[in-house]
Amino acid sequence: MKCGLRSGPCSRANLRMAHDPVQMQLEAYNAGDVERFMACYTPDCVVEDGAGNRLLTGQTEMRPRYEALFRSSPNLHCELINRTRIGRYVIDEERISGRVPAMNHAVVIYRVQDSLIEHVRFLRETE
């Protein structure tokens, strides 16, 4: 099969999706798999709230936080409502259930570099 990069299963968009760290981290999040989840992020990834306040810096801060979240929230699930891609940015609207502490609705802006997530900004709505 010749792979023409215009459309079909070998299109650039489909090849990019095959190595999509944002989708892969969503699947790992829903599975509660911290190893797969962390593999989607750069070692020095920055996680911020909507106002730009740093919540976590680097995998050394992220890993224990997500290990605790996955452990305390066995029914954790994130439903993707909408995804928009603009260059290196991916913007997800999400509905979250089974999270302790509760968070129901969020918009998350991911910045991707070299097939890894390097920056995350959470805009959250809590109960």
Image (tube, helix red, strand yellow):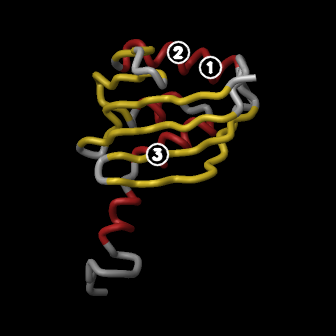
Q: Nearer the viewer, mark 1 or mark 3?
A: 3
Does the CB distance between marks 1 and 2 fall below 8 Å?
A: yes
- Secondary element under disc 2, as helix, strand or loop, is helix
Which mark is in front, 3 or 2?
3
Q: Are marks 1 and 3 in contact (CB under 8 Å)?
A: no
| Disc 3: which residue | 91
Q: Tell me if 124 is positioned left or right of 98 in this view.
A: left
Left or right of 118 in this view: 61: right
Crowd tier of the residue under label 2, counting other residues whose Cα lies within 10 Å: few below 14, some 14–19, many 20 or above = some
> Counting residues from the N terminus, which is met first, the one under dot 3 or under dot 2?
2
Where disc 1 sits, the SS reads helix
Q: Is residue 2 above or below residue 13?
A: below
- Spot occupied by residue 7 in the image (x, y as percentages of width and height): 36, 81
Q: Nearer the viewer, residue 61 or 94?
A: 94
* Dot 2 amino acid type: Arg
Q: At 48% from the left edge and 22% from the top edge, which residue is drawn?
A: 49
Using the image, determine if residue 20 lies above or below residue 56. below
Report the disc number at residue 65. Answer: 2
> Which residue is the site of mark 1?
69
Q: Earlier in the sequence, mark 1 or mark 3?
A: 1
Q: Residue furthest bottom?
A: 1
Q: Amino acid at mark 1?
A: Leu
Q: Residue at x 36, y 32 (%)?
A: 41
